[in-house]
Amino acid sequence: MLKESLKKWKKEVIGILDLNIEKTVKDINEFEGLMASNVDDLDYLKRETLSKDFWKQLHLKDSLLKQKSRTKWVKE
């Protein structure tokens, strides 16, 4: 029962991270489209924030996958 709950939780967490990554990429692409015609300092700050969010989400997903791999390796 605990094992099944943990598996479900992992799928949900990784799924949420994937959705966050997709949303951030979409936001970056939309924002870059808007920046092409109108650029100011606030635009650069927003782009930088979106970029940081994207890399943070990728790092979190990578960390979870490494932990999962390590756990699997220890079991074997």
Image (spheres, helix red, strand yellow):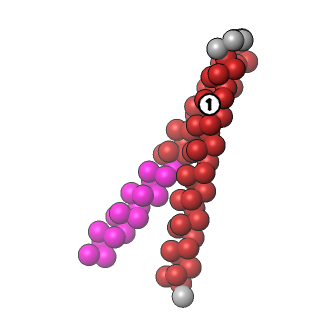
* Front residue of this view, candidates 7 and 75: 7
Q: Is residue 74 above or below residue 21?
A: below
Circle 1 residue: 28
Q: Is residue 37 above or below residue 23?
A: above
Residue in the picture at 30% in, 71% down: 74
Q: Using residue 51 as the reference point, say whether residue 35 is left or right of it.
A: right
Q: Quadrant of the N terminus?
A: bottom right
Return the x and y of residue 49 as percentages of the image width and height: 64, 30
Residue 70 visible (yes or no): yes
Residue in the picture at 50% in, 45% down: 58
Q: Using residue 58 as the reference point, say whether residue 44 is left or right of it.
A: right
Residue 49 visible (yes or no): no
Return the x and y of residue 2 as percentages of the image width and height: 53, 84
- Principal secondary structure, stretch drawn in magenta: helix
Q: Is 49 contained in the magenta span?
A: no
Q: Amino acid at mark 1?
A: Ile
Q: Is 75 contained in the magenta span?
A: yes
Badge 1: few (under 14), some or many (20 or more) residues near its Cα, within 10 Å? some
Q: Is residue 41 above or below residue 14?
A: above
* Front residue of this view, candidates 4 and 70: 4
Q: Start and end of the magenta stretch?
A: 60-76
Q: Quadrant of residue 50?
A: top right
